[in-house]
Amino acid sequence: MCGIFGYVDHGNDGAEKILNGLKTLEYRGYDSWGVAIEKSSKILVEKHVGKIGEAQLKDTAWPTQLGLGHTRWATHGGVTVQNAHPHLSSDGKFAVVHNGIIENFQELKDQLVAQGVVFTSETDTEVFVRLLTENTRSYPPAVAFQKAFSAVQGLNAFVVLSLADNKLYAVRRGSPLVIGKGKDGYYLASDAAALARYASQVFFIEDQQVVELSDNMCRINDLQTGQQVIPNWQLHHFTEEELTKGSYAHFLLKEIHQQPTVLQAILTSLDKQLTNYAQKLPSDAFFVGCGSAFHACLSASYFFPLIAKQLVRALPASEFTTTRELLTSDQFVTFVSQSGETIDVIEHLSFLKDKNVPFGAIVNRLGSTLERTSADKLLLPAGVEQAVLATKSYTAMVAVLFLLAHAKVGTLERGKKLLMETISAIQKVLVPSYEKEYLLPLATKLQSTTQIFVIGRGNSYPVALEAALKLKEVTYIHTEGFAGGELKHGVIALITPDTPCIVFAPDDEEFSAVLSNAQELKSRGAYIIGIGPHSKPVFDSFLPVETHGLLSAVSLAVPIQLLAYHLAVLRGNDPDKPRNLAKSVTVK
Ligand code: GLU
């Protein structure tokens, strides 16, 4: 959610840099955008509602060396040009961009209004801008910035372009920010991927560190200790190839097709990490995540009892607050996250640390807050995931959790064999003939439907939830996933003639029960789409896929990801950037 990009360098392609940076951050999700650039000792601001697309900045002759850009995902105030960032101070000396929510904004705003300060937007961000302006009457920019930050509450990142000293100032609490160091100067972004073109080294800013950047100086101070921080620069690891679609029409399609490679990497590179992590897991373990990561955690709640004879609990991170209160040092929480920046996850880390409750991470992004905060971790080798929908990161999480359950009881090799067979099952789905024969006809049939139901039993239940999530995220068709056994407890009332119902029917002990559920749906007129290795008369349509033990949780997901993609394209939706969604959910 929200992207921040800033630079202070001695290059002469500022306008291009800022647009490129923001475009790389587009995947995070946004509804408006803007830039602020220093030119001839003035700050020029340009803001727009909607997508960046092929936008050119109006004044393309901006060979500026100091600039800021922002993609906004509105939380306070409508999606308007006025509310878009950057926000300019009334004296025109500062431009501010912000990610997050200022929780005490109303209180601060009331105080400022009482002092006669005039507000021109509906955002919480403007409170920070006005505070900063007030502070600069008495303090130099660096101090004014720190004081403004100290006054605001909540999980936030702020970056300020300061004309007074031609610098960028940045600080964060909760929201991600990375500094990049390149041959021409310094850069700032919400995500290291946006720095790939300009910086050869990166430093991930920690909470409460205040950063001051000019083209040849980077100074970092810890707000709490007052000490200067010497950055531990890391080599930047993104390649151009990782950031482009290559020969695919969309990132979503590219990432769906990358799944065999990612799973292969899990197969060959994680043994040691898995064994070490499994040793850390006590008998009382929790798995916590959001969205698709939560569905992967739910899969773990089937893998562990069935493979390791151990009960584990899966919870959505946004609903973990009640549970965390009672945790002790005998328990262990594994947070599962693609970005490692999801605010609903991050907010639990310091709480658990303070209570000495051990926790670890299964995370895709090296350098993310979750990755850096967790002593024990399993790093997913899914690479950069640019489409908003989790596909390769989701199947990677499921595969890793499956292997972890095996590692817990010393049967990793048995688990790996099933993963190898699952990779080859997926490869058979990821071919043009499958698309032509099965997916496109089905997508065409479903193109105008208004609702879809997905059922699964046992190990396939979390996959039904995930399948429904994929379909609703990108097709905007109302789709619900539920447990096959729950049908008769209410949901079946919604089935009318021709309602599409996807039925997960892997080769497992639930096979006949789920076929009975399919039959019950069909008796009410439903149009049954079966997925699994065996075609059955009850299916009106069939997506064949081999399933191998509990890793059906991976192979069943892939045909639905592809179906969701093709439906999105047929319905004219953007598969990479679905409406209202953000990749990295950095506000609560
Ligand atoms: N709360 C701010 C706003 O609504 C920032 C939102 C964001 O993180 O993009 O403008």
Image: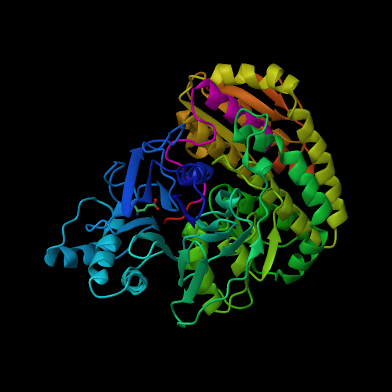
Q: Nearer the viewer, residue 73 or 478?
A: 73
Front position in the image: 278 or 198: 198
Residue pictured at 77% horizontal, 54% vertical: 403
Q: Is residue 144 visible?
A: yes
Percent from the top left, x then y, of residue 558? 68, 35
Q: Residue at x 32, y 68 (%)?
A: 152
Pick the quarter of the image with the C terminus.
Answer: bottom left
> Image point 58% across, 77% down: which residue?
328
Task: Report which quarter residue 232 is drawn in.
Answer: bottom right
* The stretch drawn in magenta includes residue 465: no
Residue 286 at x, y = what percent? 61, 64
Vertical position of residue 400 compared to residue 357: above or below: above
Which of the 4 image quarters holds residue 139?
A: bottom left
Instruction: Let me know if residue 561 is in the magenta part.
Output: yes
Q: Is residue 489 above or below residue 109?
A: above
Mark yes or no: residue 326 visible. no
For the point 26% across and 45% down, which residue is it?
82
Q: Is residue 107 left or right of residue 264?
A: left
Asked whether 109 or 197 is in front, the reply is 197
Vertical position of residue 59 compared to residue 203: above or below:
above
Residue 158 % position (x, y): 40, 61
Q: In the depicted view, which residue is nearer to us: 403 or 216?
A: 216
Picture coordinates of residue 98, whole percent (x, y): 38, 56
- Determine whether, in the image, residue 150 is placed left or right of residue 415: left
Q: Is residue 70 left or right of residue 371?
A: left
Q: Which residues are magenta?
A: 557-584
Count of numbered marks: 0
* Color scheme of the displayed model: rainbow
